[in-house]
Image: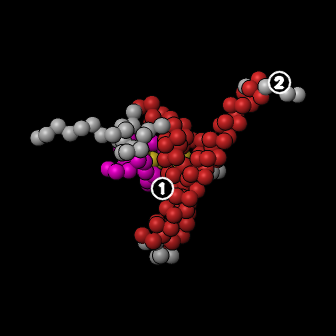
Amino acid sequence: MAKRNPPPNPILPEHRELFDAYIRKWQKLFNLSDWRVVKKPGRASKNSMAEMLEIDTTNRLARYRLGENFGIEPVTPESLESAAIHEMSHLRLHELSEIAVREGMYNDAVLAAEHAVITVIEPLLMELAKRRSAEATDAEAPESYGGTT
Ligand SMILES: [Zn+2]
């Protein structure tokens, strides 16, 4: 059997730690602090950067997994935070899916609609996160404002 090339942009242990931190950050920002959002052992299904699974609204418990690699997307703090925003958005919006399930109306169209929302808000929230962290960096280094009074 021919030896395969290593997958592009593998997810390393330090990336996993950073992803966990972003999950906790967005759990707070999305007002989901009453949930236990825990890492599930193992890797996300093939071709998934990350996944949120076993969402249990009654017990406020959800599990997530990261994949093996990000495919063609470089693994950076930004791409990891985007993935965390994406997965936490699924959790934030889960109640809507549950209502659809309860009403017997859940289907692929509901999931597609959920993704359409997430695809729009994910880059916007990422932009906001970048601005906030730039502001925080400025606040820590007031001398960078120069000599104006
Ligand atoms: Zn998704």
Residue 116 visible (yes or no): yes
Q: Where is mark 2, residue-wise?
A: 147
**In the rendered structure, are the residues bearing label 2 and label 1 in contact, judged by CB atoms less than 8 Å apart?**
no
- At which x and y percent is residue 80? 49, 41
Disc 2 packing (10 Å; few <14; some 14–19; many ≥20) = few
Instruction: Please give left or right for residue 138 compared with residue 84 in the image.
Output: right
Could you tell me which quadrant the N terminus lies in? top left
- At which x and y percent is residue 12? 39, 33
**Residue ranking furthest to the left:** 1
Q: Which mark is residue 98?
A: none
Circle 1: residue type? Ile
Residue 33 visible (yes or no): no
Instruction: Reply above or below: 132 against 45.
Output: above
Q: Give the range drawn in magenta.
A: 37-55
Q: Which of marks 2 and 1 is nearer the N terminus?
A: 1
- At which x and y percent is residue 109? 45, 71
Question: Is 54 included in the stretch rendered in magenta?
Answer: yes
Task: Confirm or reject: label 2 Cβ below 8 Å from ligand 1.
Answer: no
Inter-mark Cα distance, 2 to 1: 53 Å
Disc 1 packing (10 Å; few <14; some 14–19; many ≥20) = some
Could you tell me which quadrant the C terminus lies in? top right
Q: Residue 55 carries which label?
A: 1
- Labels 2, 1: front one: 2
Circle 2: residue type? Gly
Q: Residue, x 74% and y 31% (percent of image)? A: 139
